[in-house]
Each structure stands twice: as structure tokens, then as C-alpha cells.
């Protein structure tokens, strides 16, 4: 990572029309089309939606990051605007509501808009951010339908802005070690992956329990981690899926979305993946069985600390703040190359969306759904 | 457990025609119909089939047990007869081959015949042992078809002899603790069970890879532990099953039986069970997620040491030799009540056989199979 001085120089050079290719050793992109700030040492991030994840994780991270900082907020609640404005010493011109949000186009302090709204609102705000010429981070799942995900990708492409999905595990040391050992075949060929993620959901009135806002239940919210994991562990795309809804023990709460769902994915490299997600089981596991050994994480997907071991013993790795390393690395990549890291981009989110929707189709029909 | 003197007295009383009911406080059975030895302090066990499980586990156990001992053998290999005869100082009259086995009827030293042959031979030797008036233990899976299992139960009923299946986990301390915590709802209501058992099978010529002898692949051999576990953890019988065969990476080896299979069981108490068994993954896990906590074993099903933990911390329990405690407890039950423990009897084995066959049907058809 360049230090602040060299980063500023770098950004100034870019604004002058130099191609990044000459600096990064790649001819894949041209600087002229990038929208990079010239007057900041750090990338300015505006959070859209100030719920608990924004408040307790992302805002905390943005106080620690060196490549980016909390530059603005977008909220529909004036009280929150006041509270955050004071707490983070935000300039009033960097505070928007959902109506005047599009004016952010003129705001040079904001480089990246991070959408942390309920799932059904992701599309609207990602598209509006793109049209405002801002790079966009969007929480997972990226949308509530495949079509929306495709539209979001197209909008960002049309606006020539980056689109990233908040897949924080890619930057987490234990997860990275699992990926490394599996991809480098340290434990041989991966044959079987068991991955479960569930928690006991609280407030029965929350948007996560409304299909129109969430797109689905625990599969959309936490099962997506398991689906992601099966893809990043194998480095492959699944061939087919079968799935089963679990029983509903509390029909008053689970009248709109599933209480739990199990699924099975087949991968081209002959890996079987069994997954489960639930709003009524506290569970988070990733277990990989390979021809020469095994590696497992548990807790595997929460905000940490992640713990893990292999057949060779416990994994001793740094415990990090997930959102801090995620934002730091994404912004580092952008500052160095003008791009977000490939594995967290919109098309990767779209792949997950297609699998999630196929899991629902398989569970509803009882049929094996082909993904190729 | 009574000491040897009181046990001998007890057996002598029984042979005199007293009812066990008056001793055991139960009116469910009459002594006159039991076939109990009168001239042994310990029950005499004859092993049928001297493969590695008989040699390395059961014979070892029978040197440690106080309620039973190795009284005889049945083998088709004269060299093994010699070897075992010397090693265990066996009387020649207690050594049989597969042809003269039925003469065991006249042998008062043999109380229990333990069938440790390939699965497809279980039925023949259980039926012959029953007709010879001997109580029978049979290795799991009890048969290669539901019909055979039913015939075996009927034969033992007709002959008024006990039939037990070698379900050793019921006697293993960690497993017993899982059962206790789940049945007593120490961790609340069980909502989800994850259970996987697989190993990398060796010699490609062995009977376990031949469907005619094994009845199936890893599901029959080790998956049965997972199916058993889902029943003893919940204390319920499953309502339905879905299943999927895994990919075949070594078609030369897995031309007759499955390489791996995943399945999902629904239970009436709203528990979802996801299972997996394989001859190409080294894995043995039992994880129970409940409304107030979790409990898990891993290694869960091998010969030990079993290890386990709960949300409250590690389980610190005695490490035992599984086959020793199993035989000791089964024979204790028999000596005290004239019966084998209920949860390892033939009808329990039959329940598993029906589930195993339904898993195969579900995997082959892609359909959800009802079990009720």
C-alpha cells in the first residue's frame, strides 16, 4: 500500500490523464474513464442506511482504515443524521436523505457509496449511486432477484463505476488460509464440504422476516455465506442443486420466509457440498474433507473471532476486525488499480444470487435444478 | 451387576422354572421360555466369522468382560481354527465350521452366537443360530434387505431366542451423554442434527465393495451409524427422507456400490437431520443444534477415543473399549432380565434397514420418500 504522500501523488497523476496501466503493469483499463478523487488522501465513503451493521461494524471500521474514511451518510431519519454528524464530525453538505441523495453526484468528498439498506432497496440505491458517478459497495445479498442483480451490474458498467459486494470473509485470515490450503491442495483434493450457518432471529417485526424486503429467509441472509464458501473453497461453479425446506415450528413468525433450508450442491471437481441455514438454530460451521486431510472453521462466518483447525492441528492466525480489513483491502485495490478485487465484484454476487434462487426453486419443487 | 456367586444362583433359580418377573419387577416375560445356561458363571459367546472386527475388537473385548467370554468359534478356514484355538485355549468341541455349525444346538457351553460375517450372510446364520436354540448377536447392518431383517426377527421369535444388533454406540459414554442431554432437553429442543461418517476404503477386492455381499456401499457400512444417531438423539422415527448420490471419482472401484451419499431426514418433533457417508472422505461427526445450545462429538463413531463438547465446554468422560462395554452391558441385561437391551434388538435393526433402503430409493429416484 502506498503511503499517503505517494497515494496523493498517484491520484493526482491519474487525474491528469495518465493511464494506470503503466503504473500497475496491466493494459486492461484506461485511467481516463476512472473517476478518482484528486483532493483526498483517503477514499471518502458514504454509508446509505444507518442500521446496526452500518453503525456497529462499518462505521467502526472506517475509523480504523487508512485507505478510506467515513465521509458522508444517507439516512431517512433526521435524528440519526444529527447523531452521526456529531459523533463523526461530518460536514452538513455530506449528509443526504433518500430524496436528495442524487445530488451526491456533485460531492467530490464522496468516492464510494456503501449501500447497507434492506435487500429490496439495494437495486434502487446502487443504480442511483452509479448514475451519480460514484463507485458502489453493496451489502449481501446484492438483490432480491437475479434480474435486479443483472440490472445493477449493467448500471455500474454503463456509468463506468466499480460495484463490490460486502463479502467480508475473503479478507479474513482463517478463511484465506482455508482457501489457500484447498486451492493449493495442501490437504489433497476436496471431496466434501459441510457448511451450516444459522442464528435465532430476534424481533419478529424486522424486515428480514418479510419476503418483499428480504427476498427470502435465512438462506438470503446467512446461507449466502455457505454458498459463497463452497465457491471460494473449490474455486468452481456448482453444476446442480437439490434442496429441502425444514419444518416450521413457529408459523406466526415464519409465515413469509423459510425457517430453515438444507441444500446440496455438486461441483465439477467432484465435490459434494451440504449446506443448511436457519433462523432457529445457532450454528456456523465450515468443514472441508479432502483426500489427504481436513480443514474446518467454527465459528466460521460471524464477526469473530473465527477459530479453525486442520488434521495437522489448530490454526494460529491473527484475529482481525472483518469490516476493517475488507474496506482497507478493497480501497487498496482501487487505489492501486482503479478496480475493486475481482472476487467481490457484482458478477460474483450475481453468481450467488442465481444459486440462491435455484435453491429456493429446488426446495419448492423437490427437483434437482441444473445450474449450467 | 450381581457377582459371580449370585449370578450363578440366579441362573440356577431360573432354570428351576421361577419367573424372572418376580426378580426384575416386570411381568412382561416368563422364565420358563428362556434358554439360560445353568453351569456357567459367564455367558459363553461363539463368534461366527473371524475377520478383523472379530479378531481385533470382539475377541479382545471377550478377554476383558466379566459377564461373558469367548467360548467358541465358527470359521470356514482351518488355519484360523488352529490359530484361535491355541490363542484362546478353546476346547475342540467348541470349534465349528459353516457345515457342522447347526450341531452347536447341543453345545451347552455356547449361550450366544455372534454373527460377524459379510452382511449378505447374516440372515442365514442368524436363522440357523436361532433354530439351534442360541441367542444371537448380529453385526450391523443386520441384513441386506428389509425382508431378510423381518425373517431374522421372526426366526428368533419362533425359536424364543434373543436377537441383538451390534450397535456399540449405545454403550459409549460420550454418546450416552449426548442422548441424555438431548432427551432431557438440557440444551432445549433439538432442531438440527448434522452427522457424517466416512472413511477411505482400502483393498478394492473386499466384500464391502460388492453389492451382493454388502447390500450397498458406505451407507450400509457407516452411514447406518448416522441414521441410528438421528434416531437415538431424537428418540423418534423419521417421517420422510430425501437423498442424493455423490459423484464417482473412481469408477473402477465404485462400480457396484455408491462412493458417497447424502440424505436428509425429517422428524415429527421438527428436527432436520442432514447426513453423509462416503468411502472416500475421512469424516466422523455428530453435531446437534438445539434451542438452548449445542452438543457435538468428533470423532463420533470410530472405535475411539470419542471426543465431544457442548456450548458449556468440553465433555470429560471415561474413554472405554466400545466392544467390551457393549458385550458387558448386553450380557448383564440378559443375566438380569432374560432379555437383551431393547434399543439394540432386532426390531431396532429393522427400523434402520427400512430407512437405509428408503435413502437408496430416494437417491435413485430423486423423490422424497415417506417413511410413515
Image (cartoon, coloured by chain):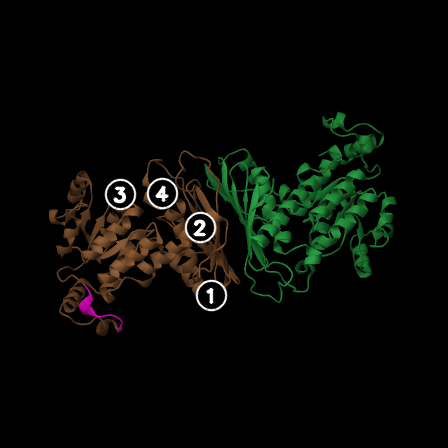
Chain colours: A brown, B green
Q: Dot 1: few (<14), some (14–19), or many (≥20) neighbours within 10 Å?
A: some
Chain letter of disc 4 in the image: A
Question: Circle 4 — which element?
Answer: helix
- Are there few (<14), some (14-19), or many (20+) residues within 10 Å of tag 4? some
Q: Position of residue A21 (x, y in %)?
A: 23, 72
* Secondary structure of the residue carrying numbered label 2: helix
Which residue carries the number 2 mark?
A361
Q: Position of residue B363 (x, y in %)?
A: 57, 53
Between discs 2 and 4, the one toward the N terminus: 4
Disc 3 or disc 2, which is closer to the eye? 2
Q: Is residue B137 above or below residue A337?
A: above
Write down the chain letter for disc 3. A
For the residues marked 3 and 4, what is the alpha-carbon distance in whole angstroms? Answer: 19 Å
**In terms of depth relative to the viewer, which is nearer, B340 or B253?**
B253
* Label disc, if present, on residue A211 of the rendered structure: 4
Disc 2 versus disc 4: distance between alpha carbons? Answer: 15 Å
Are callouts 3 and 4 both on one chain?
A: yes
Q: Quadrant of the N terminus of chain A?
A: bottom left
Q: Nearer the viewer, mark 3 or mark 4?
A: 4
Are discs 4 and 1 both within one chain?
yes
The residue beneath circle 3 is A51
Callout 2–callout 4 Cβ contact below 8 Å = no
Residue depicted at 82% across the width and 38% down the height:
B37
Between the C-alphas of marks 3 and 2, the distance is 31 Å
Examine the residues drawn in magenta and state their main secondary structure. Answer: loop
Q: Quadrant of residue B343?
A: top right
Amino acid at each position: 500500500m502506498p503511503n499517503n504522500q505517494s497515494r496523493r501523488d498517484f491520484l493526482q497523476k491519474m487525474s491528469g490523464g495518465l493511464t494506470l496501466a503503466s503504473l500497475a503493469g496491466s493494459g486492461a483499463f484506461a485511467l481516463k474513464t476512472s473517476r478518482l478523487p484528486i483532493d483526498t488522501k483517503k477514499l471518502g465513503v458514504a454509508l446509505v442506511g444507518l442500521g446496526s451493521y452500518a453503525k456497529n461494524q462499518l462505521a467502526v471500521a472506517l475509523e480504523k482504515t487508512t485507505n478510506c474514511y467515513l465521509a458522508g451518510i444517507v439516512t431517512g431519519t433526521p435524528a440519526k443524521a444529527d447523531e452521526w454528524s456529531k459523533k463523526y464530525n461530518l460536514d452538513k453538505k455530506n449528509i443526504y436523505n433518500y430524496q436528495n441523495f442524487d445530488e451526491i453526484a456533485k460531492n467530490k468528498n464522496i468516492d464510494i457509496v456503501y449501500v447497507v439498506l434492506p435487500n429490496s432497496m439495494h437495486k434502487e440505491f446502487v443504480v442511483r449511486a452509479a448514475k451519480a458517478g460514484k463507485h458502489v459497495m453493496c451489502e449481501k445479498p446484492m438483490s432480491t432477484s437475479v434480474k435486479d442483480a443483472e440490472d445493477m451490474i449493467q448500471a455500474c458498467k454503463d456509468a463506468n463505476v466499480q460495484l463490490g459486494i460486502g463479502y467480508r470473509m475473503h479478507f479474513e485470515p482463517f478463511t484465506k488460509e482455508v482457501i489457500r490450503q484447498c486451492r493449493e491442495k495442501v490437504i489433497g483434493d476436496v471431496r466434501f464440504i459441510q457448511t451450516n450457518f444459522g442464528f435465532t432471529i430476534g424481533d419478529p417485526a424486522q424486515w428480514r422476516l418479510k419476503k418483499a424486503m428480504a427476498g427470502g429467509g435465512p438462506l438470503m441472509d446467512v446461507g449466502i455465506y455457505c454458498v459463497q464458501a463452497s465457491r471460494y473453497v473449490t474455486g468452481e461453479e456448482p453444476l446442480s442443486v437439490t434442496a429441502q425446506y425444514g419444518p416450521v415450528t413457529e408459523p406466526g413468525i415464519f409465515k413469509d420466509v423459510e425457517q430453515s433450508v438444507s441444500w446440496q450442491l455438486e461441483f465439477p471437481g467432484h465435490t459434494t457440498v451440504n449446506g443448511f441455514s436457519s433462523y432457529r438454530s445457532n450454528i456456523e460451521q465450515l468443514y472441508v474433507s479432502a483426500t489427504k486431510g481436513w480443514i474446518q472453521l467454527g465459528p466460521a462466518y460471524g464477526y469473530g473471532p473465527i477459530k479453525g483447525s486442520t488434521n495437522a492441528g489448530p490454526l494460529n492466525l491473527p484475529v482481525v476486525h472483518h469490516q476493517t480489513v475488507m474496506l482497507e483491502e478493497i480501497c487498496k485495490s482501487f487505489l492501486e488499480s482503479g478496480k475493486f478485487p475481482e472476487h467481490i465484484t457484482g458478477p460474483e454476487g450475481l453468481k450467488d444470487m442465481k444459486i440462491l434462487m435455484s435453491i429456493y426453486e429446488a426446495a419448492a419443487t423437490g427437483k434437482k435444478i441444473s445450474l449450467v
